[in-house]
Image (spheres, rainbow, N blue to C red):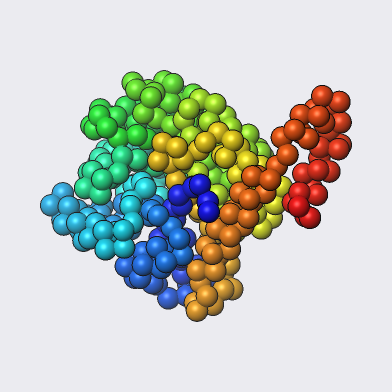
């Protein structure tokens, strides 16, 4: 039995399009996905705003409420919760050049409008977390945006959100690149710095995605640990990534099992989840996967995760202590590898 509760996003079962080719699998309706998520063993769903209100950018507040209530009914039917709402500002002609940091005032205003609507949706669904993956908040052409002015704009936008609703928490999901060349908030350290500068830092924390840390050339466990040490790890997106390539969102543990083990170890040791946080996955099936087994990457990620949790339970802390005392780190390292391969 796992001590964790798990979440997943509808975009994790996607049609398989990539930068070089179109969709290869048909779109599965939201209700069918939610039903399947609950059957696989997930407890909550992560949502982008337009997963709930498909044409949100052109909808009014009454329409947004109406469509949200339809999704609420589906969630209730399958006894699932909403973990967070994230404004999807990167697929939107109004925010092609970034939302909160766009050079256009009109676009910046639209981004704030969308962030407020995400808060309204979260309210209707009984969740208090807003995730900001700041996808296009950065530059393609470095000289096109003033970095200082725009980092202040990001802080101001978060302040407006905190002010709009006194209960919501803002979770920033850092990523160094893609779709942007250089992002303004690339790592968890930047997230914590930005959080400290807001009007209520106790409501601004982080969500760490494994692949994003690897793309930044950093160790995902230490990124998780940094946010944990500040009491601000409120979400994770576990997955895997083969080095500094395009964002791959591979099955958890499929590339680096020891790194995956250490992510689970730090979460277990620090009692992650005790304040209701979920272990979220952000994994995508390979483009080659056929539709009839297109949830396989979710089953596999959960299985790897739970097997690694068992390995963590078996971890011999006395042996670790002895090795540390003698500074025999070679012995400790072999112990970990033995635990993973034979143990
Ligand atoms: C993009 C990414 C997003 C966020 C949610 O790389 O990870 O799916 O997790 O907006
Ligand atoms: Mn993610």
User: In the shown orientation, is residue 24 left or right of residue 152?
Assistant: right
| In the depicted structure, whether residue 333 falls above or below residue 232 | below
- The residue lying toward the viewer, choosing from 150 and 330, is 330
Q: Which quadrant of the figure has residue 34?
A: bottom left
Q: Which quadrant of the figure has residue 70?
A: bottom left
Let me know if residue 193 appears in the view.
yes
- The residue lying toward the viewer, choosing from 108 and 52, is 52
Let me know if residue 106 appears in the view.
no
List x then y, in percent, for residue 233.
48, 34
Which residue is drawn at the image coordinates 65% and 37% (left, top)? 218
| In the depicted structure, whether residue 308 falls above or below residue 287 | above
| In the depicted structure, whether residue 227 falls above or below residue 176 | above
Q: Which quadrant of the figure has residue 166?
A: top left
Which residue is drawn at the image coordinates 13% and 52% (left, top)? 62
Which residue is drawn at the image coordinates 86% and 38% (left, top)? 331
User: In the shown orientation, is residue 63 left or right of residue 216?
Assistant: left
List x then y, in percent, for residue 139.
50, 39
List x then y, in percent, for residue 147.
48, 28
Number of dots carrying numbers? 0
List x then y, in percent, for residue 153.
37, 28
Which residue is drawn at the image coordinates 58% and 32% (left, top)? 225
């Amino acid at each position: 039995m796992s001590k964790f509760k798990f979440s997943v996003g509808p975009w994790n079962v996607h049609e398989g399009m990539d930068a070089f080719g179109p969709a290869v699998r048909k779109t599965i309706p939201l209700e069918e996905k939610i039903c399947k998520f609950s059957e696989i063993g997930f407890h909550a769903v992560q949502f982008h705003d337009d997963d709930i209100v498909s044409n949100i950018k052109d909808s009014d507040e009454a329409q947004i409420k109406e469509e949200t209530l339809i999704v609420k009914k589906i969630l209730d039917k399958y006894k699932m919760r909403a973990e967070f709402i994230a404004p999807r500002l990167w697929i939107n002609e109004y925010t092609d050049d970034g939302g909160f940091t766009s050079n256009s005032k009109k676009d910046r205003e639209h981004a704030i409008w969308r962030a407020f609507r995400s808060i309204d949706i979260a309210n209707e669904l009984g969740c208090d977390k807003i995730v900001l993956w700041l996808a296009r908040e950065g530059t393609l052409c470095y000289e096109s945006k003033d970095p200082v002015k725009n980092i202040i704009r990001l802080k101001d936008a978060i302040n407006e959100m905190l002010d709009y609703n006194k209960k919501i928490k803002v979770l920033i999901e850092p990523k160094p690149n893609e779709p942007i060349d250089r992002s303004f908030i690339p790592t968890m350290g930047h997230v914590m710095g930005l959080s400290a500068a807001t009007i209520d830092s106790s409501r601004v924390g982080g969500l760490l995605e494994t692949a994003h840390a690897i793309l930044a050339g950093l160790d995902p466990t230490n990124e998780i640990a940094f946010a944990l040490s500040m009491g601000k790890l409120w979400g994770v997106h576990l997955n895997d990534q083969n080095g500094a390539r395009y964002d791959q969102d591979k099955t958890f543990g499929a590339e680096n099992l020891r790194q995956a083990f250490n992510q689970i170890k730090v979460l277990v040791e620090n009692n992650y989840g005790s304040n209701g946080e979920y272990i979220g996955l952000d994994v995508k099936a390979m483009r080659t996967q056929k539709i009839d087994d297109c949830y396989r990457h979710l089953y596999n990620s959960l299985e790897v995760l739970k097997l690694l949790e068992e390995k963590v339970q078996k971890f011999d802390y006395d042996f670790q202590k002895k090795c540390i005392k003698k500074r025999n780190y070679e012995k400790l390292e072999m112990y970990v590898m033995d635990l993973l391969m034979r143990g």
